[in-house]
């Protein structure tokens, strides 16, 4: 291909069309300049707000310098795909203490398995069109500052909860990138429209959003229930409520999500009725059942011990019932020490609640 501004502009238009045909709602092109983002990342790491996610600092500046990750990179193609499923009402589920709340993104198939092949198809289509192309596809799978790159590509702005927001689509979407050695014409970043709103800061159950555009992962329910491999700090257990995998509160209250659209992707729809399951039923799953029913799901990331740990906390926060107590007692001799400790905490909480309930009935 003859690399002229006019040809590159036409190619960009084609890439957007091809992306749309592959199921992406938006394609953008951005620069690889992330100097300010690199400074913010380093400050965040220095403050220890990444918790035990050591991989966040393991790659040094590679995360904020795309050309170090893939030499020759000149621009980034960013893509977004809506994922909001047609599921049970989120707020109602959060209020039903005996039911489990699973983050909307994890109700269906693991997004990596859907986005990555489609981005690879898009990259291959570009290569077939122009000939030789140096590229690499990423879907949250390497040291990439995807939200900053998507912002550079005009897909939205980074909100006060540090999630990308699109003016026409809210924030219920996945991101993916293709690093290319083509100087594609960059899109203009959009203005930040958070204004004086602080809904996400105020709603966070554990006050993990410690300030506008600042999240302390060590307090975040998504981190505590997914990335964290150890015990959940006691100070956060009650605030977790019935959230057994991730947390969506900051997105649920965001005013811009009134523009969000339900996903048409069947793979993102809830599997095994995980949008409405009772805690006791999920806690009763054997490890084989867990592995079978979470095959191809992002939930696998928590592991079976993490799954039981999270459910034990949720059961401890549930309404006092003989069923919940019996369910916890059925696993109180679990071989994993971490799981046993959370079961003991939950039982103590429920039993003390039962005593208070009985004493009030006797009055």
Image (cartoon, helix red, strand yellow):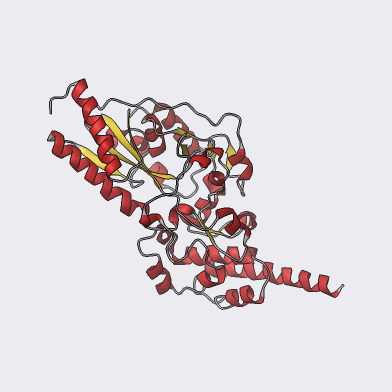
Residue furthest to the top in view is 5
Q: Quadrant of the N terminus?
A: top left
Name the quadrant containing residue 355.
bottom right
Observer-nearest residue: 266 or 218? Answer: 266
Q: Is residue 49 left or right of residue 59?
A: right
Residue 330 position (above or below residue 10): below
Residue 191 position (above or below residue 211): above
Name the quadrant containing residue 207.
top right
Residue 356 position (above or below residue 153): below
Observer-nearest residue: 268 or 284? Answer: 268
Residue positioned 55% across, 63% down in the render: 100
Q: Quadrant of the C terminus?
A: bottom right
Residue positioned 44% across, 49% down in the render: 262
Residue positioned 48% across, 40% down in the render: 170
Observer-nearest residue: 230 or 163? Answer: 163
Q: Is residue 355 left or right of residue 310?
A: right
Looking at the picture, how far across and down is residue 209, in whole percent? 57, 41
Looking at the picture, how far across and down is residue 118, in whole percent? 27, 47
């Amino acid at each position: 291909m003859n690399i002229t501004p006019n040809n590159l502009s036409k190619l960009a238009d084609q890439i957007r069309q091809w992306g749309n045909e592959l199921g992406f709602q938006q394609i953008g092109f951005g620069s690889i300049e992330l100097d300010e983002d690199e400074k913010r990342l380093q400050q965040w790491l220095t403050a220890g707000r990444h918790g035990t996610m050591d991989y966040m600092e393991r790659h040094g500046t590679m995360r904020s310098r795309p050309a170090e990750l893939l030499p020759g990179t000149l621009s980034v193609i960013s893509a977004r795909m809506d994922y909001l499923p047609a599921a049970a009402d989120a707020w109602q589920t959060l209020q039903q203490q005996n039911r489990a709340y699973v983050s909307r993104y994890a109700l269906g198939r693991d997004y990596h398995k859907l986005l990555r092949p489609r981005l690879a198809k898009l990259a291959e289509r570009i290569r077939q069109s122009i000939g030789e192309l140096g590229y690499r596809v990423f879907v949250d799978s390497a040291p990439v500052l995807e939200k900053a790159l998507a912002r550079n590509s005009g897909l939205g702005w980074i909100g006060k909860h540090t999630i990308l927001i699109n003016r026409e689509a809210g924030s219920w979407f996945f991101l993916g990138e293709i690093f290319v050695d083509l100087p594609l014409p960059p899109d203009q970043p959009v203005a930040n429209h958070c204004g004086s709103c602080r809904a996400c800061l105020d709603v966070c159950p554990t006050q993990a959003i410690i300030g506008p555009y600042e999240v302390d992962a060590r307090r975040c329910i998504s981190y505590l229930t997914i990335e964290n491999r150890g015990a959940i700090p006691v100070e956060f257990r009650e605030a977790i409520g019935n959230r057994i995998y991730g947390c969506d509160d900051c997105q649920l209250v965001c005013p811009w999500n009134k523009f969000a659209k339900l996903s048409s992707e069947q793979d993102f729809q809830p599997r095994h009725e995980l949008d409405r399951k009772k805690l006791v039923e999920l806690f009763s799953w054997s490890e084989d059942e867990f592995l079978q029913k979470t095959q191809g799901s992002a939930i696998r990331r928590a592991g079976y011990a993490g799954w039981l740990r999270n459910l034990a906390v949720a059961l401890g926060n549930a309404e006092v019932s003989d069923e919940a107590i019996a369910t916890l007692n059925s696993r109180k001799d679990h071989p994993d020490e971490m799981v046993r400790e959370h079961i003991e905490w939950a039982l103590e909480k429920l039993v003390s609640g039962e005593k208070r309930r009985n004493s009030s009935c006797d009055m």
